Image: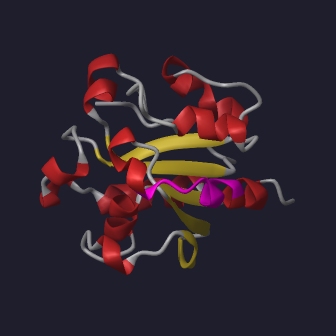
Amino acid sequence: MLSDVLTYNLDIVFCGTAKGKASARLGYYYAAPGNQFYSILHKTGLTKRLLLPSDCYLIGDYNIGLTDLVHSQSGNDDVLAHENYDVVSFKQKIAKFKPRYVAFNGKKSAAYALGFDGKTQKVEYGLQEQMIHQSRIYVLPSTSGSARKYWNEKYWQELAELINQP
């Protein structure tokens, strides 16, 4: 299990679905070689330098937090059991730490957290009207290499612009 990277006064918490195989093996968020997470954070200016997966527990230095909806299982979304999505615990964490934004790294985690029972066709990318407690919600195309066909950097740029507004 990966430890959450959460604290108070964060600008944003990125929420994935579950740790992938490489992350489970290495113990770092977004550790697969084909994952674009750290490179897009740097490209959009959310981090001043290009972080490595091994830097994930230092990401709070950039007012960024990390968590997943599924902590008890690892792998791609298509192998995760419905009952392992812990939306209640996730929302409790958001209520406790009160980040300005919650950004879902992919539609699947958003589809569960927003009450659509995992049905991704009901979720659009971008800023959502719904909020989780006091936190704004933004849905992003997944950085996973297995989701490359859905990739669109535009949403990551838009999120960075929102974060950088006072």
- Magenta stretch secondary structure, dominant: helix
Quadrant (top left/top right/bottom left/bottom right) for the N terminus:
top left
Magenta stretch: residue 6 in it?
A: no
Q: Quadrant of residue 107?
A: bottom left
Residue closer to the observer: 53 or 156: 156
The residue lying at 35 percent from left, 59 percent from top is 109
Counting from the top left corner in percent of width and height, residue 163 is at 74, 55
Magenta stretch: residue 154 in it?
A: yes
Q: Residue furthest right?
A: 166
Would you place residue 59 above or below residue 25 in this image? below
Quadrant (top left/top right/bottom left/bottom right) for the C terminus:
bottom right
For residue 80, say whether it is visible.
no
Residue closer to the observer: 143 or 133: 143
Instruction: Give the magenta range.
Output: 150-157
Q: Quadrant of residue 2?
A: top left
Counting from the top left corner in percent of width and height, residue 83 is at 14, 59
Residue closer to the observer: 43 or 56: 43
Q: How is the image coloured?
A: secondary structure
The residue lying at 31 percent from left, 67 percent from top is 112
The residue lying at 48 percent from left, 53 percent from top is 151
Counting from the top left corner in percent of width and height, residue 105 is at 46, 52
Counting from the top left corner in percent of width and height, residue 124 is at 47, 75
For residue 116, say whether it is visible.
yes
Would you place residue 65 above or below residue 151 in this image? above
